Image (spheres, rainbow, N blue to C red):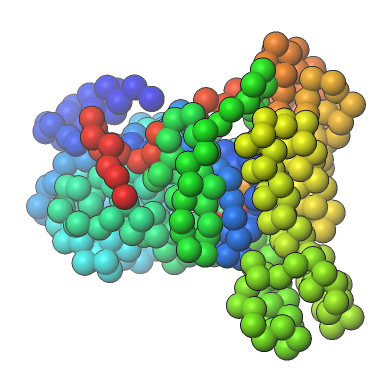
Amino acid sequence: MDANKVRDKFVELFKAEPMIARAPGRVNIIGEHTDYNDGFVLPAAVDKEMVFAIAENNQGVVRAYSIDLNEEATFEIGDAQPREGWINFIIGVTAELVKKGVEVKGYDLVFSSDVPIGAGMSSSAALECALGTGLNTMFEGNLSQEEIALVGQASEHHYVGVKCGIMDQFASTFGKENHVIRLDCRSREMELVPLKMDGYKLVLCDTKVSHSLASSEYNTRREQCEAGVEVLKKTYPEITNLRDCTPEMVKSVKDQLEEKVYDRCLYVVEENDRLMRACDCMASGDLVGLGKEIYGSHDGLSKMYEVSCPELDFLVEQTRDREDVLGARMMGGGFGGCTINLVKAEAVDQFIADMTAAYKKDLNKDMAAYVVVTGDGARVEAEVLSK
Ligand code: GAF
């Protein structure tokens, strides 16, 4: 995203030259709701970003302005109480950085974004990672990029109220153009895998809906997985998380688990297996095989994990008989947002036109579509920070 309009607005409002910090949204090829179960994920940073212009004011206050909403808000550095609206994200990141020992003495900021909001592309992680990276540099916090990503996650937990995993913040921080990140969410080891989609493109179909269930149901899923682990541990004391289980282990304790808890646990362990197979498919260029795993992921998310919604299911069903689509599934936390589709490159325009028309005709709703372009992770202007 062009940072000039953000910089110019900052100069107009605050009469000073700012530092520019930016961080991207993300997509995820496969591995959904596995991160908080210590499993694996396969996200990539995209070219859509959150851009911040920031400068110290040394007055113990934060004066913030959102270009996209044409709204301003302020708070005192010592006042870390959560609030309604976008300023809550800024308060959260600031407070979590202070907890980590970063001496934030007050700053002015202007920001803007081209990451679609509510599309499941992690605009909130983009905000957290851009701001965290900028403030850490400005106030000489010496936090590593990994610590900044964890600051973003902590602010989701404590300020937004979503007990999210680490996928979004790690993708936004460590993404690299033309690569996906194979992230082990237990050890936090990352492997950058070249994204080779020979003759195919990743296309997002945005339902443009965001159901209110998203955060409460997200936290419930996490609790159900944890409840399942407690039961599994009685038979398998060596495990600490679903990451350590096979589908057979989960099936062997079926009669001890509540029905929903069983479905949630089995989905997670199967999704980890699907991700492993998907990585093998990508390594050998087997996009047909990758597509099958992607459809398998959607079926599990919709029927066993129950985080899909009619709009997402509709968009996936529309693709099943198309020869130009190899795989489709809901992406991210669920209850709205986007589907991710593996589409033949030469058919992308037709695909988008058909999907848009079907969504309008059958559901009377407007769909948006984005052809995925990968990008780099969080950085301050002209300087890509490394781990
Ligand atoms: C949301 C969360 F923020 C992630 O941590 C992850 O759990 C994802 O939902 C589901 O895979 O984006």
Q: Position of residue 270 (x, y in %)?
A: 76, 58
Query: Which quadrant of the figure has residue 75?
Result: bottom left
Q: Nearer the viewer, residue 154 or 376?
A: 376
Asked whether, in this view, residue 380 is left or right of residue 309, the answer is: left
Q: Residue at x 36, y 55 (%)?
A: 146
Asked whether, in this view, residue 273 is left or right of residue 320, the answer is: left
Q: Nearer the viewer, residue 138 or 31?
A: 31
Query: Which quadrant of the figure has residue 173?
Result: top left
Asked whether, in this view, residue 286 is left or right of residue 192, the answer is: right
Q: Nearer the viewer, residue 260 or 93?
A: 260
Q: Work out whether 305 lies above or below 48.
A: below
Q: Position of residue 237 (x, y in %)?
A: 67, 86
Q: Is residue 70 visible?
A: no
- Count the marks: how many? 0
Q: Position of residue 6 (x, y in %)?
A: 29, 28
Q: Residue at x 44, y 40 (%)?
A: 175
Report the quarter where the N terminus lies: top left
Q: Is residue 313 visible?
A: yes
Q: Work out whether 227 lies above or below 124.
A: below
Q: Position of residue 206 (x, y in %)?
A: 66, 32
Query: Which quadrant of the figure has residue 127?
Result: top left
Q: Residue at x 15, y 53 (%)?
A: 140
Asked whether, in this view, residue 54 is left or right of residue 40, the answer is: left
Q: Residue at x 78, y 31 (%)?
A: 288
